Amino acid sequence: MKTIGVLTSGGDSPGMNACIAAVACNAARKRLRVVGILGGFDGLVEGRGTELDEKCVSDIAGRGGTILQTSRNGDLKTRLSASDIPDTFGRLGVDSLIALGGGGSMVAAKMVADTGFPVIAVPCTIDNDIEGTHYTIGFDTACNHSVRAANDIMDTAESLPGRVFLIETLGGDTGHLAVASAYAIGADAVVVPELKADIAGMCRRIKTEMDSGKACAIIVIAEGAGPSQKLADQIAEVTGRRVRPTVLGHAQRGGHPSYWDRTTARRFGEMAVQLLLDGGSGAMTALVGGSLTDVPLCIPVGASRALDVDTYHIINRSAQ
Amino acid sequence: MKTIGVLTSGGDSPGMNACIAAVACNAARKRLRVVGILGGFDGLVEGRGTELDEKCVSDIAGRGGTILQTSRNGDLKTRLSASDIPDTFGRLGVDSLIALGGGGSMVAAKMVADTGFPVIAVPCTIDNDIEGTHYTIGFDTACNHSVRAANDIMDTAESLPGRVFLIETLGGDTGHLAVASAYAIGADAVVVPELKADIAGMCRRIKTEMDSGKACAIIVIAEGAGPSQKLADQIAEVTGRRVRPTVLGHAQRGGHPSYWDRTTARRFGEMAVQLLLDGGSGAMTALVGGSLTDVPLCIPVGASRALDVDTYHIINRSAQ
Amino acid sequence: MKTIGVLTSGGDSPGMNACIAAVACNAARKRLRVVGILGGFDGLVEGRGTELDEKCVSDIAGRGGTILQTSRNGDLKTRLSASDIPDTFGRLGVDSLIALGGGGSMVAAKMVADTGFPVIAVPCTIDNDIEGTHYTIGFDTACNHSVRAANDIMDTAESLPGRVFLIETLGGDTGHLAVASAYAIGADAVVVPELKADIAGMCRRIKTEMDSGKACAIIVIAEGAGPSQKLADQIAEVTGRRVRPTVLGHAQRGGHPSYWDRTTARRFGEMAVQLLLDGGSGAMTALVGGSLTDVPLCIPVGASRALDVDTYHIINRSAQ
Amino acid sequence: MKTIGVLTSGGDSPGMNACIAAVACNAARKRLRVVGILGGFDGLVEGRGTELDEKCVSDIAGRGGTILQTSRNGDLKTRLSASDIPDTFGRLGVDSLIALGGGGSMVAAKMVADTGFPVIAVPCTIDNDIEGTHYTIGFDTACNHSVRAANDIMDTAESLPGRVFLIETLGGDTGHLAVASAYAIGADAVVVPELKADIAGMCRRIKTEMDSGKACAIIVIAEGAGPSQKLADQIAEVTGRRVRPTVLGHAQRGGHPSYWDRTTARRFGEMAVQLLLDGGSGAMTALVGGSLTDVPLCIPVGASRALDVDTYHIINRSAQ
């Protein structure tokens, strides 16, 4: 093996750049070349790449987003047949691949690996919804955004009591980000796409607590369970309280990666290079039981990790 | 004069606590007592107060919100007649008042001052919409929230080009916060309640620019010109681009006050105590032409400051 | 069991308040009283306490430091004999104890538990140096401070190439915080109290790399390996480069607790209440292998966790 | 005029990139070319430049530092004689110059302007020490760093009372940054290079206040009045208190520019282009009396602005 291609695919997440930097630096020390493929799997098909040496990546690790850009086109099969793979990579001059991305990207990585081309995948998504790993790069930074919003809201909530605040998180069609955020900030309820919420019951509980003197209530809703304005209207109607929504939107996906995301991104990046050097392929770097390891990209690759239902019920104070 | 009452009224703003601390510390050095009136003008009517010495305020200046809490009931006239004023303040043991708040609070402060009771007002609102001063405490911190959101969004915008982002700011029924934020972040357009926007023209311009290679567009909308979802739908329809909104909500009103808000809050607080000592009343501390000064609380007190229309047009690239 | 006493001891760490809030709220739901003991073990001896209900803790979880204050006097034995314990707690009206703190506090907690009084300890220190748990509350927030400083420094480092930057972290007489920070930010070297550094070799390596075109170098030094000015002078002499130190100091110990610290603080706090209810004592809540659990406060309680020497050598590019 | 050269010189400051972006975008709208000169006046002499179109600057405005890099070599006279100027700029293909930087850079800009070549200077330094303008780009962001450090320190200061904290700011040989920071955070004393401090008296005052129950003290020292360790030792000796220093170092010069710095940077950048178009030269954009304007780069160009001695004495509670 002489040249590693690296690409970022799907939604970007903070820490992708730190992982790219780790791949480039670790490869350089092992005297391997690295080619950054631009624009995700689309860019792979189109043969767009650029050499990445240590100098190129010297100041990127602390930046959000991805310098390689990404694309949402996970449906690699419609664009690339197995027989095209050798030529596609040949044009870029790479003989192995490290693919960073979310669930859809893992599927595409598996498709490439199945053709015999060496591929290691690195799970990167703020949704933390990939089966096989307890952690995906970007989740911690995204959760810190929720916590910061809650801190800011508490300042005004305590100053003018009697209000209800909604925080809408990202998370696509999963609720990991919402549940983790809600538990951390001590939210009074959380609404996610995976589970049908008893909105009426929740509103009555909030009303009872606030009528008994609770100064404010904070409810977290995942974007996939929205629209949050509808929920805000329902809460306002039942509680008779003013309800103010904060929608984090794509601001939640940006910003400098946190300590944990930079650490994990670097660990995963260094591990991915070593796995390729050791002849590995078809695997994903993973955090399992507190340890860094790798797991096979097997079926059902890209499956969504199950929600932490226990924590959901703790937040919602509901019987389990 | 022996005892100053201090209260915060209307929407809280970051820097109120720093101003309260400045009042308490400056008064203590001049051997005056300070009573914090709880819950704004409502608390005044109800006679709720607490002594504020230097120790009480030693760790509050850096916190958002107001430890005195506030109330939205600006309509003091319906609750308090001029003849009640002496007794109302007598019960609290205060013989002068420093009132922190927005436009509505300035009206209430004027009403009290008109009865002959010594009152100095300090303009505090993130809306920066009070006639007579170029600056109101909290505005800078609130604008920094917009800038931070834009920085975060840019990370992801550059990584996955072709999208449009909306940022909805607070600002009540004024657009100062939206215009200042939009200019600072280099937004492509801004929509405010004071001026009728040519939404269709704006969408066409954004479409043209993006079709010509511009990676992303950011549009700022004031809450008073919302709902932002409606605007998002219009932009999506015309441009054919995915539009992602971020609604800052009340998170924009919280957080640690910035350097500038702490500085101005302290200046205004120290000045307010001195003005009372010098026998002043019916005045508002103000920033005019870069200098700290005081202006009379005259009619039309509480009037909204005119929008900076020139900057509005620079942002929207429109003829003036 | 009816009333839990809770205290914070040793150096404060961000997340202590979130843990106190979790203890108070969880206890309230289980119809237990909570008394906050003020000023750590000193306050325990002096019988200083205050009732903590849910309302008291409603707005503290997001704040750094500890509302209960702390004291550095870990040497409980000189102030309290085993026979005093029943009376000491009797005066405060508490029949069990949750003690938050670092290594010294674990020793004191063990001493109390050994008298037969029910005690659960919660590891809280930004140093992350307690044997028996992989994580102590506050470490993540403290590491985020290092990362933020590095991000800030990189802006100017890239703008005016050719300089060396030192970042001095806290960490007492251990290097966990320095090593974790240095790995995350991709520092060029790290100096810790546990291991003798080859300063001359390190300086020569930095000089060689920079003379070959590397734009800047960042070196992390733990406070226990300082003074950093001495190191700065050595580096400047060998490399001929200007060396600029940043000393995080106690700013690294403050600030809002991060997502991870709030989550772990709440988990540990809820677990501590449950452990007491289940009749447990003499145990410390812990994170082991990615799972929350509890471990006995056995000898050598308070021992320092061993440094991650592998990571140290990766950072310093040294043979192991 | 057809092509503007833009360069950044001296110490970088947050907002330089926002100003570069404003120059490039405003020039583009006026159909002018912009060439970014790399590495300050050194790069000018060496003829290093790169074209800057709107696309190049689309994502830089929110970043600290300067993409054009800078150099500390303000001594242009030794490298460039007046007769070289036409050729120097001719090689870069530029016929006018916008120079961003501090006091030294203003001197260099003046030297170029005196040869008849059109030059507009923009004051950029976190030191805010340039005569002729009340504001230099970067100062607000740098002050926000001080405030954030003070907020962080307060968390731990309130938790473990009885300590003294030192914050060392940047500022070169001036104390503007230290005084402004100290006033904003309510520091108990400030030490600057311009004025001889009564250290012994200050220490006695701090001791008296703390012995009377004050929980903590914060003292700000400008780097030019250091070393801060010496001051820390003096304070510790007199007060008998533990003194903990935080040295902001170059972290204070980085980070995303604040709202105010982005606004001012954009205003100054747009104004500089317009001034050149209007035939202006030898002028510096400035903030005077709250208004944007321009002032001549006359002698003593580069002179240090006088310290705000009144505020210094308010902080130090000293007779004036």
Image (cartoon, coloured by chain):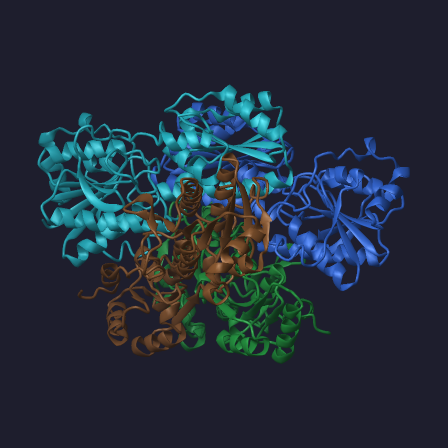
Chain colours: A blue, B cyan, C green, D brown
Whole-percent x and y of residue D65? 51, 54
Whole-percent x and y of residue A141? 58, 48
Q: Residue at coordinates 67% horizontally, 42% vertically from top-left? A: A69
Residue A51 visible to the viewer: yes
Residue C267 visible to the viewer: no
Q: Residue at coordinates 43% horizontally, 48% vertically from top-left? A: D258
- Residue at the far front in the pictured view: D83
Image vertical order of residue B25 relative to residue B41, above or below: below
* Label total for image: 0
In-image side of B225 versus C137 (left or right): left
Q: Residue at coordinates 59% horizontally, 38% vertically from top-left? A: B157
In-image side of B7 versus D100 (left or right): left
In-image side of C284 versus A244 (left or right): right
- Residue at the far right in the pictured view: A83
Whole-percent x and y of residue A64? 60, 47
Image vertical order of residue D174 relative to residue B279, above or below: below
- Residue sitting nearer the eye, D55 or A199: D55
Q: In what quadrant of the picture does the C terminus of chain B appear?
A: top left
Whole-percent x and y of residue B63? 36, 49
Q: On the image, which quarter does residue B79 sit in?
A: top left
Q: On the image, which quarter does residue C209 sit in?
A: bottom right
